[in-house]
Amino acid sequence: MIEKVKFFFRVTGNNLWQFRTRNLFSVTIICLSFLTVGIFVSLTNNLRDTARDLASNMSIAFYLDAKLSAGAVDAVRQEIARPAFVESVKLVSAVEALERFRLNFPELADVVAGLKTNPFPPSLEVRVNARASASKEVVAFVEGMKKRPGVTDVLFNQDWVEKMQGFSRLAGAIGAFLGGILILTSFFIISNVVKLNVFARKNEIEILRLVGGTNLFIRIPFWLEGITLGLLGSLLSLGLLFIVIQLFPVYLGASLGALQELLRFRYPDLTQAVALLVGGAATGFIGSATSVSKFLKV
Amino acid sequence: MIELFHIWKQYQKPYWALSDVTLQINDGDFYFITGPSGSGKTTLLKTIFREILPTEGQILINGINILKVRDSRIYTLRRTMGLVFQDFRLMFHRTVFDNVAVPLQVIGVGRKEIRRRVFATLQKVNLHQKMWELPGRLSYGEQQRVAIARAVVNNPEIILADEPTGNLDPELAFEIITLFKEISKQGATVIIGSHDRELIRHFGDNILFLQKGKIVGKEAHR
């Protein structure tokens, strides 16, 4: 058994070397296909993480009527704190709001100094738990509170979270679409390369058959060949992806300006990296298996 | 024992490559099949080997009908046979060693044992010094000897050889048939398709004469 395994690997190695030019071509195609998938995986990772960050930091500001009594403010506060998704409620008085403005915009200190009355209303700042951040429940709650007497306005950055999640989904979909097409192309290329290899070794296959080689014995080296090509291609694509992630911010990052944050690549995690490798091997295997079973009637 | 019952083979109408061939070859027999070109020698050997299927008839090898068995039995059967083809069927991008080692690799023999047996067999056909050459660099005669070495390396029970001395000089042809004869003495059945009258006269224990696919004569000298 061990001898046979060794034999299969030796034959596979010989075959890969014998048809190295066309095998190199097919590894390059697989590599480019999986690199495209990897780039989109990396972009999707970034957009998804950004959306998650936004969602976890999401706060809702309920602006209150300045004339509300302390008791009324407390009643609103209690009502806002009631839903389970509310993590904290903080009262920001009109004085605190003015102070914040002064600290955040020091260049406008003269304007603030010239004010005769405080234009900032008091507000209740609400932190919502990240899981429920853009849920219908929260939206319905906010809509309900908007109509409540004593609440003059609501600032809710739900749109941003939704947009970010939308971008993330879009990038994922584009990646899946382009990657799917390219992986399909790789699959056909591997299939054809193995087919050419099968034709080139027709004589050898015939000999193996005649000396008692089973179907499996003849097919295994071709399967191994496909798996090796797929694995090499996807491994190379992972290497290139890491280089792209390293070099992209150095060469193009600055020119992207505000988009830099959105188009930042993140390294694929271990599961994604393993999935890319397994995907490469599977593409190679399926490509070779279909061509061998079709063109190797033994 | 190899038994053929009423074998008919037609490649193209209206010609019959084999017509009603019935034959029995016992274990250890040394058999020559002879006849002019196109008489059906190669077809008969290929049929025994089940490389081609007859149009009609039955073939039994050691009591097993090889035309009705599952594929898995055919692989096993072929492993007990050694074949020498008229066109050698060598792997030209593999060394002489690799070519001869193939039947042993198929059955999973260890590498050391393969080396030992391949070397010993190549010595017998006087090619051990060219073990690492590619067949393309050898003469026709040498290529034929590689094919012969591949056929006998596995100590097969049955050897089927189609014109195994066709490209060899008389001296070497004599040596090769002597080698087949020795293998036969050890119990293997050897069937050789040839039209070399000199060799047949010298070695032919059993001779089958074919003409236009029909058996036209049999001789047994043992």
Image (cartoon, rainbow, N blue to C red):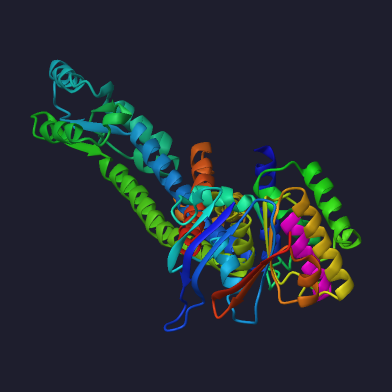
How far across and down, in percent of the image, does residue A252 sit?
56, 59
Tell me if residue A227 can be seen.
no
Q: Position of residue A108 (x, y in %)?
A: 40, 43
Determine whether, in the image, residue A52 is placed left or right of residue A209: left
Tally of numbered discs: 0
Does the magenta stretch mainly form a helix, a strand or a loop?
Answer: helix
In the image, residue B140 lies in the stretch drawn in magenta: yes
Q: Residue at the location (18% across, 19% down)?
A: A82
* Relative horizontal placement of residue A202, taking residue A169 as reference (left or right): right
A233 to A129, vertically: above or below:
below
Residues shaded magenta: B138-152
Quadrant housing residue A119: top left
- Taking the spot 86% from the left edge, 75% from the top edge, the residue there is B170
Considering only vertical position in the picture, is A137 above or below A293?
above
Q: Is residue A138 visible?
A: yes
Is residue A123 placed above or below B79 in the rendered structure? above
In which quadrant of the rendered image does the N terminus of chain A lie? Answer: top right
User: Which residue is nearer to you in this view: B95 or A214?
Assistant: A214
Question: Viewer-proximal residue, B38 or B19?
Answer: B19
